[in-house]
Image: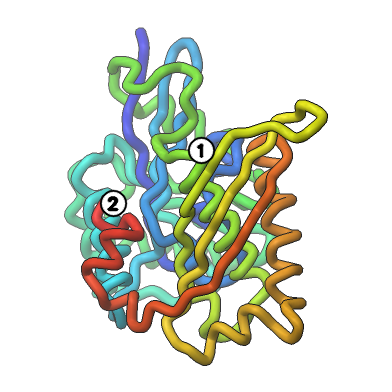
Amino acid sequence: MHKSGFVNIIGRPNAGKSTLMNALVGERMSIITAKPQTTRHRIIGILTEPDYQIVFSDTPGYIEEAGYKMQEKMNAYVNSAFEDSDVMLYLIDPQEQYAEDDLLVTKMRRLDTPLFLVFNKLDLVDDNQVNTLERQFKKWMKPERIFAISARDGTGVPELLDAIKATLPEGPVYYPEDQLTDRSERFFVAEMLREQILEQYHQEIPYSVEIEIETFEETQTKDGAELARISAVIYVSRKTQKPILIGKGGASIKKLGTNARRRMEDFLQRKVFLEMHVKIREEWRDDEVWLKRFGYDR
């Protein structure tokens, strides 16, 4: 019997959803930083074995009070995950405070598909914190299974995966066996550049930028090695942000390019020539046309 299905991971910003999906799939599909709202899109990760195929979905952290149209689009990705799941993973950060009337808690209570409550970050909290929160959630909803894990160091992840496999229905192979995601290389290199911006810059800068890959060409170096020539535009939402991104004498953007190129080379397994330009697109986070251009209607 072949099992298959769609497993969606939902939770608050910075709960560890991307880290968990990467751990479950065994590949680094989603970018990870310590900053909340790192994930902006719904990203698919596919795990295929002879007797099963699991299509994991990493979603943005749900924002109770969206401040921009971009955040409304991010919330829409989360809402869509309630419509197509065979198993739902509700990822909980025990360091956070939760309430019975939280919107996600309310949505989970109405869920028809199997719900797994997953308490993450065991490497950062003690058992008492987890147990207290577990008792609360048992009063609010009736999950099919409850797990305590550390997505970062892998504690409890194999047991979670086994439970997912046992719960999935009998089904077909939805994607080719060698396919890991539904996203293109262009998407991932843009995300890697944004990841380095999140790591390198502070305050509002990381949340005000969007990346557009203008060109992605497969060529060769003079000695015949494979080379990817990538031209990227970094859009900022205010004029004052451009000089901050570039830095004095171009030092900041040079460092950014070096770190992003290394990350891309590791992912693409070939040399990368990366060219970057910084442009201003004021208020793009509230502009429907530009949000569509950046892929937020997907």
**Quick one: label 1 or label 2, which is nearer the N terminus?**
2
Q: CA distance from mark 1 to mark 2?
A: 18 Å
Under circle 1, the secondary element is: helix
Q: Furthest-right residue in view?
A: 223
Q: Nearer the viewer, residue 147 or 212?
A: 212
| Left or right relative to 75: residue 59 | right
- Residue 148 visible, this angle: no
Question: What x and y, as percent, mark residue 131?
Answer: 52, 62
- Residue 173 visible, this angle: yes
Q: Is residue 184 above or below residue 261?
A: above
Count of labels shown? 2
Q: Nearer the viewer, residue 196 or 255?
A: 255
Q: Nearer the viewer, residue 291 or 86?
A: 291
| Left or right relative to 196: residue 97 | left
Question: What x and y, as percent, mark residue 14?
Answer: 51, 66
In the rendering, which numbered label is found on residue 9? none
Q: Which residue is mark 1?
A: 160
- Quarter holding residue 169: top left
Question: What x and y, as percent, mark residue 220?
Answer: 69, 32
State which quarter of the image contains the N terminus: top left
Q: Nearer the viewer, residue 8 or 219?
A: 219
Q: Is residue 121 above or below residue 175?
A: below
Q: At 41% from the left edge and 22% from the top edge, which residue is drawn?
A: 53
Q: Furthest-front residue in view?
A: 222
Q: At 64% from the left edge and 64% from the top edge, which residue is drawn?
A: 196
* Colouring style: rainbow
Q: Which residue is mark 2?
A: 142
Q: At 44% from the left edge and 79% from the top edge, which residue is drawn?
A: 280
Q: Which amino acid type corresponds to the residue marked 1 in the rendered image?
A: Leu
- Quarter holding residue 90: bottom left
Q: Which amino acid type corresponds to the residue marked 2 in the rendered image?
A: Lys
Image marks 1 and 2: residues in contact by CB distance under 8 Å: no
